Amino acid sequence: MNHWLIAPIVIPLLGGIVQTFMGYAPISLRRTLAIATTVLILVSSLILVSLANDGSYRIYAFGNWQPPFGIVLVLDRLAALMLVMTSVLALFAHLFSIGGADEGNRQFHTLFLFQLMGLNIAFLTGDLFNLFVAFEVLLIASYGLLMHGGGTVRTVPGLHYVVLNLVGSAIFLIAVGMIYSVTGTLNMADLAVKIPQVTGESRNLVEAGAMMLLVVFALKAALLPLCFWLPKAYAKATAPVSALFAVMTKVGVYAIIRIYVLMFGDDAGQLANLGMDWLFPLALITLAMGVIGALGADNLKTLIAWQVIISVGTLLAPVALGSEKGLSAAMFYLVSTTWTVAGLFLVAELVSSQRGSAGDRIITAPKMRHRTFLSVLFMMGAVAAAGLPPLSGFFGKVLILKSVESGPQMAWLWSVLLIGSFLSLIAYSRAGSIVFWRTVDGHLESPQPLKGTVSVSAGALIALTVVIVALAGPITEYTDATAAQLFDASAYTEILQTRMVGEDN
Amino acid sequence: MELIFALVIGALTASGVYLLLRARTFPVVMGLTLLSYGVNLFLFASGRLSTGQQPIIGSTEIYADPLPQALVLTAIVIGFAMTAFVVVLSLRNLADNEDDHVDGCPPEHPADRAQEEEEPGK
């Protein structure tokens, strides 16, 4: 039992509740409290990552109920990595939002904090049904956030997003029911023990349930053919919300890594590596599809939304191959791409605010103010996203390319990833040169100069790509250790033997 | 009992999926509701069907599993909240676009478009 584990959930919960009742308080007070909460979440995540770094599993059992009977939170290196990645991103997105994006709705900060709570529960939970609840918490907050800022443009993408996710939840419940009816447990560690023992006809039930779970996670992760909702929804949302949503697809990726490596890994007998032969080609097609979308995008935000889909494809391809090196490379790329994409969403919003009626559309417009600052940020983001040296995207992609063993899969991955990177580079160069270099005569009706907080938070998120390069050594060590820990499923199942508080020997 | 139960779940799910694929928001919301009914019954059945049994292990030969009941309760509450939200969103869609089509406006029919193109030439 370690009580720190509950901190990343309780802090946003309390912060969110306080915000709920402060809807009519002065906005500066609400903002200060909201940012303070996000900073506290970051601090608690950093404490958890330092705890998790020793390679052992820590659990928090709600109500002191011994797993598998109670719900547990489990902290390992993967969960800690996701927590830190999310809270760093959330802090900058939240800072960006106090530059004005949080106006127009009294409950923006409440929703933002509840969204973080849902994300943190999803990363920490060790129970399949609790994962469902976490998904619902983060989804209902995201529905509100997606609609935030109003405007009729957000209604239709919002409706599609909500209906699709409700169907996803229904499928999740069916899958959970199927797995429970055979194994009689929903604790992940207990499932990892019980699933290899399932034989005969019941095995088909578990197999069907597991494949349905894959469909649900693929919907969250926006894997083809379940990705068409994403570009519209992300491109239309407010910038800090889009930036935070960069993590949302990664929750699907996280769930695939967590569930399939643990329960359907190499030890799972006849169910070993279930679904991974589907995942690999789908991931590559998703990657190709994302590149095509990026080439055809007519505004910056749509371009970046397709980049989200590209990164999902890039991430899931090595995960599907199921090697330890591939998983480690995927996690390195995961951190890098999430921060870069979020930074790009913020930069696109700043560009759009300086271009008057042209907005973020990829068309020529009069010269904008702060052109040098914005173009440098956009270029750094584009270089990192396309995977050119010397920024972090390059290292992530090189690690992924190096992780495949030679064979037909290597040929496929190398060709799709490299051609895809080249084409996305073209998409970024086209967008950047039209938006920043080709200007027409005339002047804009003096747009507001950039505020300090928005410039700093967008700049900082983009600058993180340099930080990742500087710290590439320690980060790869950590992701290597994470992958090794994930593949040792027997260590995870030992949490079932953890002694509860007050229990005699 | 099993047969009736299975048929009911199947009918609810099938009609839910059918309605979900309609182009107007009202049938879509109805479809979601029916689908969630079907799913809740299915989840309930994952603890096996029995009548008049105690939910305590060891007390009788066959016992009623209480866990799926707890899961269903959670799922019902969440489903209720989500349905309420999607109803409001559909109304908003109707108000914003003056049309309850799921895409905001129905796709133009090719024949209509051809007619429109002809009109200016008249």
Image (cartoon, coloured by chain):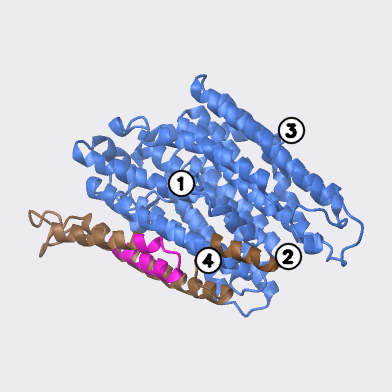
Chain colours: A blue, B brown
* Looking at the image, residue A326 lies above or below residue A174: above
Locate residue A6 relative to residue A478 in the image: left or right.
left
Q: Quadrant of residue A199?
A: top left
**Mark found first going from the N terminus, 1 or 2:** 2
Q: Which residue is mark 1?
A: A218
Q: Which residue is mark 4?
A: B106
Query: Answer yes or no: do the residues labelled 1 and 2 have beta carbons within 8 Å?
Result: no
**Mark found first going from the N terminus, 3 or 2:** 2
Is A363 colored magenta in this rendering? no
Cα distance, mark 3 to mark 1? Answer: 31 Å
Q: Secondary structure at mark 3?
A: loop
Q: How many marks?
A: 4
Q: Secondary structure at mark 2?
A: loop
Query: Answer yes or no: do the residues labelled 3 and 1 have beta carbons within 8 Å?
Result: no
Q: Which residue is mark 2?
A: A99
Q: Residue at x 44, y 48 (%)?
A: A217
Amino acid type at mark 4 = Pro
Cα distance, mark 4 to mark 2? Answer: 38 Å
Query: Answer yes or no: do the residues labelled 4 and 2 have beta carbons within 8 Å?
Result: no
* Chief SS of the magenta region: helix
Q: Which residue is nearer to you in this view: A25 or B100?
A: B100
Q: Which residue is mark 3?
A: A390
